[in-house]
Image (cartoon, helix red, strand yellow):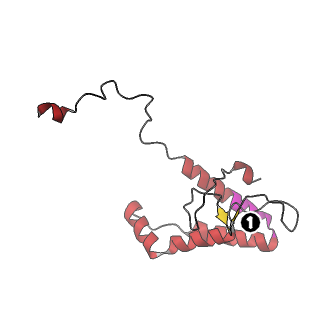
Amino acid sequence: MCRDSLVILSVDHEVPLSSFFIGWRTEGRAWRPGRADMADGSGWQPPRPCEAYRAEWKLCRSARHFLHHYYVHGERPACEQWRRDLASCRDWEERRSAEAQQSLCESERARVRAARKHILVWAPRQSPPPDWHLPLPQEKDE
């Protein structure tokens, strides 16, 4: 199942969110994958509500996001995946398509892998340097 490989975060933000967040509050209640209120009784739900995929796709296509992404990365933002995810989510809601379920699971797994592949730039210290209390070199000259 898709939900076994995802990290669910409890975030109280409104959509659109960055792709690092997979779970959040919608319509005043906590949204959790796998709620048992599915019509067919299977218990599986997309990792995000369909309106979240729509909001992310709309944000990705906005002029502000385009300019920011182009400035930072030097290329146009790739919004096709958000559109495919929205189509898959709607397909799942309408037809309970296994292909749509698999597509959404793979897409979310890829997002989680992409978020985890960035390593820390700075190594966290275990203790302060031994000379942390001494004056800085420019302060010694004064």
Q: How many marks?
A: 1
Q: In this picture, which residue range is highlighted in magenta?
A: 96-105
What residue occupies the far right of the structure in this picture? 41
Q: Quadrant of the C terminus?
A: top left
- 95 relative to 88 in the view: left or right: right
Judging depth in this view, the residue of 115 and 8 nearest the camera is 8
Q: Residue at x 45, y 35 (%)?
A: 124
Q: Position of residue 83 (x, y in %)?
A: 61, 71
Q: Is residue 66 magenta?
A: no
Drawn side of residue 100 relative to residue 38, left or right: left
Q: Secondary structure at mark 1?
A: helix
Image coordinates of residue 86 in percent, x first then y, are 66, 71
Among the 4 quarters of the image, the one containing residue 26: bottom right
Residue at figure coordinates x 75%, y 72% from the top left: 91
Secondary structure, magenta segment, majority class: helix
Identify the amino acid type marked 1: Ala
Residue at 86% x, 68% y is 39
The residue that disc 1 covers is 100
In screen coordinates, is 70 left or right of 109?
left
Q: Is residue 115 above or below residue 78?
A: above
Where does residue 51 sit, x and y in percent of width and height? 65, 72
Give the answer, above or below, for where 22 lies relative to 92. above
